Image (spheres, grey):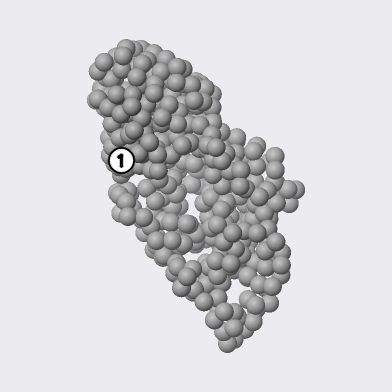
Amino acid sequence: MQPVIGYLLKKFPRLSETFILNEILQQEALGADVVILSRKTPDDEPKHPALDGLHAPIEVLPSTSGLDPWSILFAEGPEGAELLERLGPIVRDLGPYGHPRFGKLVAEALYLSGRVRELGLTHIHTHFATDSAVVAHLLHRLGGPTYSITAHAKDIYRSTINPEFLSRIVSGSEFTTTVCQANLQHLQTFLNADAQPKLRKLFNGINLTEFLPPEEPRQEDVILSVGRLVEKKGLDVLIRAMVGIARERPQVQCVIVGDGEERENLEALIGELDIGSHVQLTGALHQGQVQAHMQSATVFALPCRIGEDGNRDALPTVLLEALATGLPCVSTPVTGIPEILDHGKAGRIVPIDDVEQLQANLLELLADADQRSKIARAGIAHAAKHFDGRVVARVLNEWHRLVIDSRSVA
């Protein structure tokens, strides 16, 4: 029996989270029925063309301000009485952790307790071990579906994380997978003994048939970067490196695709360095446009760093995509990035926040077509071996199926 999977997500769709869309599409390709529960209304932003192939219904939950948990708890019939009986121990157990949105998350879980029954969901998967995972945990303890989690980066590295609270959420899951070995090792350092057995590693995958090496020759002297314009992407380092690169190669162009809170600061830096004729900020683009840039660029740069609050990238999807298209990459040793670049065999790894090393490696690759070709071949092979979305999807599908089958037998 193929599983019916509920995906409980903060917002869906989101342009910056193509990995979730790709995962759901792959699950559907394997025959799974999926229902998507978006806890908040999606942002008004470009939509990926791949959304047209999605079959799963997307249900946006009511705003917590409009929910009345009391009417659910004191409704006539056994359901309300059972929820009320279960809620007391949950509040006494988890309330002392002081989660700032605990009351609102309880209200969401109470609402969902009825909705998941109507939808026939017996298992829920969440991405990020944050509020959506907390709602899934609360929902399960209220008598609802089992749940599983994919942990990424901001949800496990930020300095605000409460290890004991996160341990409770992970230990209550059927399994918690994370996207690279570096993440797994990090989680093992602080989660408690009850949570440890639930941990698994599963790389994010991509659709390798959509990210192919170009048939036409690549452009010369084009550096591409793709990502949200936020601190952890280190794009200010790339802009500073462009000063020296442009001096050596006057025709060079750097295209930075994405949008975010740092855009104004990056634009100011470009003006301050008088590098505007060599650096272009395109804003957010949909996946097809990103693919076109990856097909034509000369090299790819993503100088990631660790943010002041500990936030960082774990396994940047854009690096997987660049690898698969044979686009030589230069990045940094942040969390899972060395695993993507095969520890320097399938791309260049430079120190964090090192303008000179980033500049030197990009200049070397721009000038050396043989090196680019060698790295491209290694990257394509590494992507095919480790990041094939079809393979990853089959593993996750089997994990979900085993959970659902065991529940139906019980």
Tell me which corner region of the image, top left, top right, bottom left or bottom right, holds residue 226.
top left
Tell me which corner region of the image, top left, top right, bottom left or bottom right, holds residue 410.
bottom right
Badge 1 marks a residue whose secondary structure is: strand
* Residue 176 visible to the viewer: yes
Question: Is 330 displayed left or right of 210 in the figure?
Answer: right
Q: Which one is nearer the viewer's eye here, 75 or 407?
A: 75
In the rendered image, the residue lying farthest to the bottom is: 76
Percent position (x, y) of residue 106? Answer: 58, 67
Tell me which corner region of the image, top left, top right, bottom left or bottom right, holds residue 103.
bottom right
* Residue 179 visible to the viewer: no
Question: Is 176 displayed left or right of 257 in the figure?
Answer: right
Instruction: For label 1, count other residues whose C-alpha is less than 10 Å away and answer few (under 14), some (14-19) or many (20+).
Output: some
Residue pointed to by mark 1: 283
Q: Is residue 195 above or below residue 343?
A: below
- Could you tell me which residue is drawn at 65 percent across and 46 percent down? 199
- Could you tell me which residue is drawn at 45 percent across and 34 percent down? 233
Percent position (x, y) of residue 185? Answer: 65, 37
- Could you tell me which residue is drawn at 57 percent across and 79 percent down? 70
Q: Which one is nearer the viewer's eye here, 220 or 33?
A: 220
Percent position (x, y) of residue 105? Answer: 56, 64
Q: Amino acid at mark 1?
A: Gly
- Could you tell me which residue is drawn at 34 percent across and 17 percent down? 245
In the rendered image, the residue lying farthest to the right is: 193
